[in-house]
Amino acid sequence: MDRTILHCDMNGFFASVELLDRPDLRDKPMAVCGDPESRHGIILAKNEHAKKFGVVTAETLWSARKKCPDLVTVKPHHEKYKHYSKLINHVYGRYTDMVEPFSIDESWLDVSGSRLLFGGGVKIADDIRNVVKKELNLTLSVGVSYNKIFAKMGSEHKKPDATTHITRENYKDILWPKPISELFFVGKVTAEKLTQVGIQKIGDLAATEPAFLSSFLGQQGLLIHDYANGNDDSPVLRSYERQKIKSVGNGVTFNRNLTGESDIKTAITGLADVVASRLRQYEMKASGVKVDIRDPGFKTISRQKKLDGPTDLAEELIPAAFALMKENWDFSAPVRMLTITGINLTIGEESDQLSFFESDSETRERSKKLENAMDAIRAKYGDDAISFGSLINNDIGI
C-alpha cells in the first residue's frame, strides 16, 4: 500500500505572524522587509492584499513599491517565527511522530500509520488546517500524496488555506501541464537549460529519454526525471533520526581545474553555502569542518579542524575552510574536485546550550538573519533564486 505523505506550508508565514500583533494592518497591503529603512531592502513575505498587487518574495522594496505605492512594511522578528514554528510542529505531532521540518514554515508528515485513528490523508490535512487556524490564528496549505515531492508540489498548487490531493491517477493532469520551473529541485539555471532544448513543461521532462538527460545534466537529470514521473521513495525523517546524521557535506568536480586564491575562495563560498543551508534544514550545527581536495591526477588529501563553536552559518564555515586549505595546499597547484563537510554535529537546541554564556556579536546576528532570509527565499523560488555575490557568473560550475 502507498504511503500517505503530507506537506504543510504556512501561508505568508512571516507576514501572518506579524499581523497577530498588528491587526490594524490586516486589510492593508503589507510585507515583511529585511531593511524597511532602505529602498534596497528585500521582501521576505507579504500578505494576500500585497500579493494582489503583484508583490513577490525576494524582490527589492523599491520594486515592490513601484507596484504598490501604499505598501506597509515591518521589520522581521526571527525569534517570534521560531516560536510559532515550534507550536505548529507540535500540532503536527498530535497526528504522527514522523514529522520532518523542511524550513521554518514547512514540514513533511508521514501519516500512513495514523489513518485508522484520524481518517485518510485529506481528512487529516483538513483537521490540521482547522486546528492551526483555531488555536494559532494562522493558515496553511497542505499537499497530500504518496511521495514527498508530489506532496510538496500539492501544497503549492492551491493557496491560501487549501488542501490538494495528488494521486497516481491525477498527477499527470495536475502537474504535467505546469512549467518546468515549478518542478521541485529545478532551479532557475536548470530550467533555462531545459527550456533551451525544448523541455518546457513537466510533462515534457517526464517523456524525455533518461539517457539524454543524464548526458545533459548528469545525475540531476535522472533525479528530476524520476520526480516528474512520481518516482520518489525518500522517507520522512523523525527528529531522532536526524541525530544519526554524522556529517553534512557538499562536493563538486569543477568545469575546469581551479588555480589561484580567487578560484579557491569562490569554490569554498559556494560549497559552504550549501552545507550551511543543509545544516539549518536538519536543525543541526557543525563543531568542525573537513576539506577534501583532489588534483587532476586523482590524488586526494583530506584535512579537518575544530571550530571555535558550533555553527550553521556559511559566513563562519567559509573562513575556516579557506584557512584549512591555505595551510595544506599550494594555491598554484590545480584542483579538480573539492568537498567541504561539516563534522562533529550537534542538534540545534544542544548547540544553543553549549554557547549559552557566549554573547553573539552584532555581525554574527546579522549573518544569521541574512542566511535565514536566504533559506526562506530559496524554499519558495529554488536554490538559484539568491546567492553570494562572488558566485555570480562564475565559470567553475558552482
Image: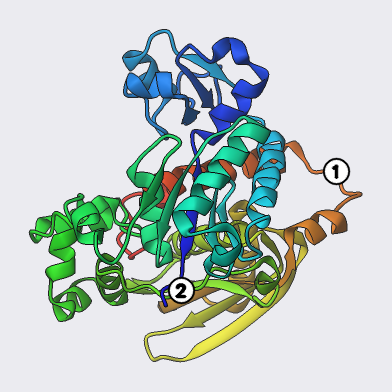
Q: CA distance from mark 1 to mark 2?
A: 39 Å
Residue bearing the label numbered 1: 359
Residue 213 in the image: x percent, y percent? 19, 73
Is 200 positioned to the left or the right of 309 in the image? left
Residue bearing the label numbered 2: 234
User: Where 363 sits versus 149, above or below?
Assistant: above
Is 397 positioned to the left or the right of 387 in the image? left
Residue drawn at point x = 18 percent, y = 68 percent: 206
Determine if residue 159 is in view.
yes
Amino acid type of the residue tagged 2 in the rendering: Ser
Residue 203 in the image: x percent, y percent? 16, 61
Residue drawn at point x = 48 percent, y = 59 percent: 120
Residue 384 in the image: x percent, y percent? 36, 51
**In front: 262, or 315?**
315
Residue drawn at point x = 58 percent, y = 76 percent: 291
**Residue 328 lies in what quarter of the image?**
bottom right
Is 7 positioned to the left or the right of 168 in the image? right
Q: Quadrant of the C terminus?
A: bottom left
Q: Identify the secondary structure beneath mark 2.
A: loop
Q: Which of the labelled discs sits on residue 288, or is there none? A: none
User: Where 252 sits versus 322, above or below?
Assistant: below
Question: Which badge, 1 or 2, comes first in the chain's sequence?
Answer: 2
**In front: 72, or 127?**
127
**In front: 14, or 229?**
229
Q: Identify the secondary structure beneath mark 1.
A: loop
Q: Answer few, some or many: residues within 10 Å of disc 1's Cα (few below 14, many 20 plus, some between 14 and 19).
A: few
